[in-house]
Image (cartoon, rainbow, N blue to C red):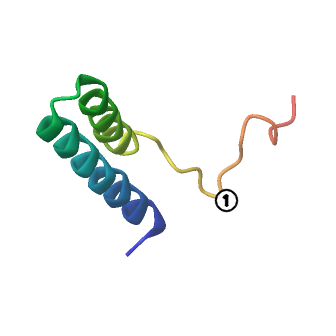
């Protein structure tokens, strides 16, 4: 399993636990923190990973 996938699953798991605990004790703040972890896990899906063999903006000469 790739590190990125592991990080996404970890964020998702933390989000489930925090959200669930916040729901159980009726704490709105914890529920929103759990949702933020869900959002972070989802946002990681859209972040592109730069390949080492592709030139970047700084590598191109004028």
Residue 59 percent location from the top left of the image: 81, 42
Quick one: quadrant of the C terminus?
Answer: top right
Which residue is located at x 36 percent, y 59 percent? 10
Q: Is residue 13 left or right of residue 3?
A: left
Which residue is located at x 17 percent, y 37 percent? 25
For the view shown, which residue lies furthest in the front direction?
25
Q: Is residue 61 left or right of residue 11?
A: right
Residue 16 percent location from the top left of the image: 22, 49
Viewer-nearest residue: 41 or 28: 28
Q: Residue 13 occupies which quadrant of the picture?
A: bottom left
Badge 1 element: loop
Residue 55 percent location from the top left of the image: 71, 47
In the image, residue 2 above or below residue 51: below
For the view shown, which residue lies furthest in the top direction?
28
Which residue is located at x 59 percent, y 50 percent? 50
In the image, residue 42 above or below residue 12: above
Residue at the disc numbered 1: 52
How many marks on residues?
1
């Amino acid at each position: 399993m790739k590190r990125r996938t592991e990080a996404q699953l970890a964020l998702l798991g933390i989000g489930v636990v925090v959200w669930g605990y916040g729901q159980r004790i009726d704490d709105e703040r914890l529920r929103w923190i759990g949702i933020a972890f869900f959002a972070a896990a989802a946002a990681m899906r859209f972040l592109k990973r730069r390949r080492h063999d592709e030139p970047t903006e700084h590598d191109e000469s004028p």
